[in-house]
Amino acid sequence: TGVRGVPCVRACVGGGPPVTRLAAPRLSEPSALHDATVEDMESERDGGWRSFAQRMGVQAPKLSVRATLAEERGKGGVFAAEDIAELEVIARIPRSLVLSPSAEAVAAAANANVPSWAAELTAEALIRSSVRSFSSGVCEDGITWQHGGGWATDGADLGNEDVRWGQRDVTGTLLSTGSDNDHNIYAKFRFPCHPVIHRAGLGLAALTRCESSKKAIDALVNRGRYYRGMVDALLPLIPEPSSRWERGSLRERRSWDVADTLSRVLARATELQLDGAENAPPTCVIVPLHERLEHCGTRGGNAKLVGRDPRLSGGSDRGRNDEVLLVATRAIRKGEAITRDYEAAPRLPEDLTNGALRLLLQFGLPPSAWPTQNL
């Protein structure tokens, strides 16, 4: 079992308003410059994201976005093109681009055996359908779906195609492999679960130096259980399956699209307070640009999403509350990577993973993002 890179996209953000600042928590970690020089970033810029940002009204004048490297597994490539002050608004993103559950998505997810935020957000992604038609460029919604999702969204993470109980034996994807009765089915063979899940769990535990293989296997089983709990409810949202599947019945291929979408959603989601009420609960959403930031590690993220500008209460500025803000939580030096804290992202119910196991399984993050004790 190995960790493999994923396809990447080149992009750049340009244009925007003057510097603005918001009150935010203060962090004291020093800036850490990325290995890439600003000249490198300039040479790697692509007009794909710039074109999208200008067309859709994304404003981020001090950011440079480059193609992610294979070893980054789709997370990274967003840098400060200039020095950024603490509390400065780094990016303004129209709310219309934020993937959040619509009434239709909530209604569909309510039919799941165990309704959850993941079912609602997956339903919304399927309704918008862009996740199932990703290509090598920036998708219409600005979310880099083509970069993959959690571990084994790409079957190559399971090793060579010729290995038994590896990627050739998955049922569509690893997430859609197995059933809720596998413990009883395979008990006579002394397997605690489906053989593919068992082998994957052993490899996942070895990769992340997990304290026990059981913890990794249980995490895979839990993901599969929640997928199976929502798949029947979400199937009506997929009239036709994507073309990526080479075999399987129509229903199977539609089911595999649900599994594939769920894995990509879990790898990108964050919590954001969209409602203006002070005590309103946060909503699980996916925000373009923010969904591809690299992990902050022990230093803490240097950027934070804000659902609305607290200084705007109405009047002529009411329209500006139609934006989501990405705000610097500390001073960021030119050339430094913009980061977020994936440990703070929402997780599936009953998910007890932490450290490298969670960072790889849910988000697909590479070893460079893991705690040092897992390396």
Image: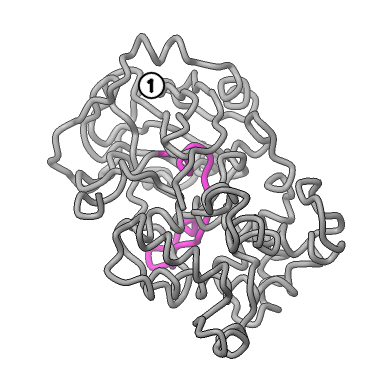
Nearest to the observer: residue 72 or residue 86: 72
Residue in the picture at 45% in, 29% down? 69
Nearer to us in this view, 244 or 318 = 244
Mark 1: few/some/many CA within 10 Å (<14, 14-19, 20+): many
Is 282 a magenta residue? yes
The percent position of residue 196, horizontal first and vertical second, equals 57, 67
Residue 339 image offset from top left, x and y in percent: 33, 39
Q: Can you give x and y, in whole percent of width and height, for residue 37 in the image?
A: 31, 15
Q: Position of residue 34 (x, y in %)?
A: 28, 25
Residues in magenta, as a range: 271-293
Name the magenta segment's main secondary structure: loop
Q: Which residue is mark 1?
A: 62
Q: Is residue 76 left or right of residue 27?
A: right
Left-right relation of 93 to 312: right
- The correct choice, above or below, for 261 with respect to 112 in the image is above
Residue 103 on the magenta span: no
